[in-house]
Amino acid sequence: MSQKNYSSNRSLKFTESVIREMTRVCLSHQGVNLAQGFPDFPAPAEIKEAAVEAIRADLNQYAITWGEPNLRQAIAEKFSWYNGVTIDPEKEITVCCGSTEAMISSLMAIVNSGEEVIVFEPFYENYGPDTILCDAKPRFITLHEPDWHFDEQELTRAFTNKTKAIIINTPNNPTGKVFSRVELQFIADLCLKWGVIAMTDEIYEHILYDGAQHISIASLPGMRDQTITINSISKTYSLTGWRVGWAIAPASLTASIRKVHDFLTVGAPHPLQEAAAIALRIDRGYYKNLAKEYQERKNFFLPVLKDVGFGVFPPCGAYYIMTDISPFRFSDDVTFAMYLVEKLGVATVPGSSFYSRPSLGATKIRFCFPKRMETLQEAAEKLKRLKKR
Ligand SMILES: Cc1ncc(COP(=O)(O)O)c(C=O)c1O
């Protein structure tokens, strides 16, 4: 007897996250997980203490739906000194369950069915399902290797009166691209001309290499009122499991984002919001040190990959390395990634999961390196076996 399928058409349009699936495959092979981007080293002690303190102080009930006032104040202070934009914490911030929820709540708050959203490709895999969940039509713009630039004419042609938003992610996952001021100004000019919202995911804003500089598109002239800036504590403070993020947007958009957010999740964990406020006010030397430690990891791991035979695209920011696997002559990225995890014990993410069509990523896989040096050394030892094949 055939079983009726009760799943919605919407849910059938996308697959389970490949990144999170690779983590599960990795666990079953007891491998080194260089697939999902989360640190295997501890978060700063003072932030953890603040969370324990907040639970002891019984901040255990719902916080204000759109975020604890103390945290919103801390977000506004930091956005002002680091990104150069002054905002009103009362009216322009929505605290969400990670930047994941901030992104989907924001998209649902602004996009009408059938409107177009421009997405640079390769893209962080959530943006695909995000556009499906809000019933948008994604329009993909290629980032061309090796430096992941976009073609100005192609981007100009993509903007029409059907375009509602453009998603920018800088520093970028998976490519490590850091959008330059010139590129952001080009995008901003198109947004201003067509009345399009820039949705910018800046969760890697402090992880920058070799002098690269992070610029927020909201800080460019005229863009403050047409930008939604998404961020979280996940990457900057190594707290991916706490699920505290936020969307910064002009008051009228924030009012809509807050409504969607309220009915999706009510709010982010209250005691962890209190601790997040402490995180955002941490001594500023912390950020320099964070970048320095990631620089060391990148400087160690990039040559390892080169040495065992990968083509590498050196990142300017974030903590990923996109690689070209064609020298290994496997049939495709998924077969190669499965070989790496099952036979060598190193989990990675197949390139196809960052593209709208799998064939576009068939010669690539992505490594992440937010790991202790011992973990990276262990992965390096395992990968050396590729040379002996
Ligand atoms: C570009 C990008 N945005 C968002 C996320 C998810 O962030 P959060 O933990 O704040 O939901 C990730 C996680 O890897 C990411 O790479």
Image (tube, rainbow, N blue to C red):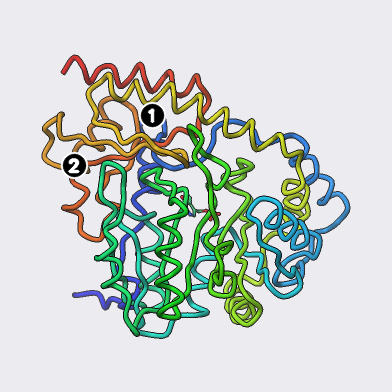
Q: Is residue 129 left or right of residue 81?
A: left
Q: Which residue is mark 2?
A: 363
Task: Give the vertical position of 386 relative to 57 (above or below).
Answer: above
Secondary structure under tag 1 reads loop
Q: Residue at x 63, y 50 (%)?
A: 233
Q: Residue at x 49, y 34 (%)?
A: 209
Question: Helix, strand or loop at disc 2?
Answer: loop
Rendered image quadrant of residue 60: bottom right
Mark 1 vs ligand 1: CB under 8 Å?
A: no
Q: Position of residue 247 (x, y in %)?
A: 60, 66
Relative height, residue 307 to residue 43 (above, below): above
Q: Quick one: label 2 or label 1, which is nearer the N terminus?
A: 1
Q: CA distance from mark 2 to mark 1?
A: 22 Å
- The x and y percentages for residue 320 are 41, 39
Q: Residue at x 29, y 52 (%)?
A: 353
- The amino acid marked with disc number 2 is Thr
| Location of the C terminus (image quadrant) | top left
Q: Is residue 6 visible?
A: no
User: In the image shown, does 302 or 239 lie closer to the viewer?
Assistant: 302
Would you call the spot at circle 1 few (<14 residues within 10 Å), some (14-19), or many (20 or more)?
Answer: many
Residue at the spot x=41%, y=36% of the render? 368
Viewer-side residue, 241 vs 324: 324
User: Circles 2 and 1: CB distance less than 8 Å?
Assistant: no
Identify the residue under disc 1.
31
x and y percent of residue 132 in the render? Answer: 35, 73
Q: Amino acid at mark 1?
A: Gly
Is 254 situated above or below 174? Answer: below
Q: Is residue 274 visible?
A: yes
The answer to whether residue 360 is above or below residue 366 is below
